[in-house]
Image (spheres, rainbow, N blue to C red):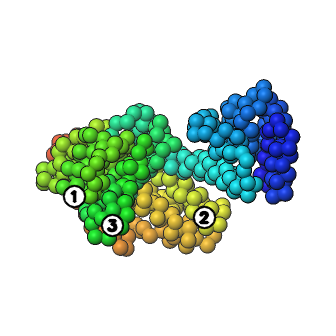
Amino acid sequence: MSSILVIDDKDSMRKMVSQTLAEEGYLVDSAPNGPEGIEKARAKTYDLVITDLKMPDMDGLDVVSGIKEINNETSVIVMTAYGTIETAVSAMKKGAYDFLTKPFDTDHMLVLVDKALQNQRIVAENEVLREELGYKIGMEEIIGRTEKILDVIKLIKKVSASDTSVLLQGESGTGKELFARAIHNLSPRVKKPFIAINCAAIPRELLENELFGSEKGAFTGSVARKIGKFEIADAGTIFLDEIGDMDIALQAKLLRVLQERTIERLGGTRTTPVDTRVIAASNSDLKELIGQKKFREDLYYRLSVFPITIPPLRDRREDVPALADHFVKKYSKEMNKPNISIAKDALDLMDKYHWPGNVRELENTIERAIILCEGKKIKPEHMAIRLSSNNEIRLREGAGLKEIGADAQGRAERAAIIRVLNQVRGNKRRCAQILKIDYTTLFDKIKKYDIDTTR
């Protein structure tokens, strides 16, 4: 039950308020003046303080300041016989939740007390939720110790403190939204909204409404004003995923928002200022889209003030065991299957796989494996990947065109490297020259495709 402290220098009022609250089941303490009330608040935590405004030694506004200094989460209601707007504003500025004008009905007081306590619980719950979300979507969720991922983390830490626009580039499934959330969580905007929107998942006419909002009657079916995502994310961050799929006409409106820091709702005539940081992401080559006249060059340069490329999983395969372990812990907990681990032959299989779907595919693979696993060890048969006799990875069932293309490219590259290495009798530098790649790239591909160079 909630605990309440009542502070009033008049015995009759103090006793009446205390008795009313006690009859409702609240745990009630009281004090005849401000200094004694402050001392009680130092010795015990209260959910709510109800204090009179006009008292000797210390008035109610000073009590509000003192209580908030001790515990900012404690709600405060001020009682006053001088119910002016100025009094209310002063109390609110000091941190009071609300005020009661004497004489007041006890039922009205109880309603206000209930609202104040509900608000206090919501604030506390939001703080816990914010901390949980900070853990779940902050840097703690970025798993990896390879040089490439550590370089990305360094860039994120550097850019997060500013309001600079960021363009995250990388293949589908590399976790671009995760990195965007990390930038937001490390920024001064962390306590403000983070709004993510997938530009590829919403038709053009609806996307404009989602981003900028609309006035009542702006289009058929528009029966009320709609607040857009840019306004909702004001003082926070908006994440525009798959920005390359945005309609070219809508790109012009977005550019104007970035330049002028204002938005105009559909059907509206007034502009609304917004202070929203933009992080965009794309798995398409935006420069290629610019050449095809599908993406505005001026918007590209406005968005890519600070570009960051997220490496594909195949280029950081040393991180696979740590990522797999992370997902095993996550899904074994969710499915109430404790103490599950990955067998060595399953880890070996994962190490040889090229992961065309990147971290997202790895996560899905582990989730599926835990569902199928009946013991304590995840084995190769629990995974939807297989090796052929020559250790090349077969495509999993249901593979899409991107996976098929990546697989075909990998097979072609492997065959070409083996052919040229045989021609030059294993001379890697000469092989790199013939293939028109640098020596380091050749070395990486030999390792990637598990090519035997000892023959």
The label nearer to you, 3 versus 2, is 3
Residue 384 pos. (x, y %): 44, 70
Secondary structure at badge 2 equals helix
The answer to which image quadrant residue 430 occupies is: top left
| Amino acid type of the residue tagged 3 in the rendering | Ser
| Amino acid type of the residue tagged 1 in the rendering | Asp
Q: Earlier in the sequence, mark 3 or mark 1?
A: 3
Q: State the residue position of label 1.
A: 247
Q: State the residue position of label 3.
A: 222
Q: State the residue position of label 2.
A: 334
Residue 60 pos. (x, y %): 71, 34
Q: Earlier in the sequence, mark 1 or mark 2?
A: 1
Left or right: residue 189 compared with residue 439: right
| Residue that appears at 51% across and 63% down | 366
Left or right: residue 271 compared with residue 358: left
Image height check: is 281 above or below 36?
A: below
The answer to which image quadrant residue 39 occupies is: top right
Secondary structure at badge 1 equals loop
At label 3, counting other C-alpha atoms closer than 10 Å, the crowd grade (few under 14, some 14-19, many 20 or more) is few
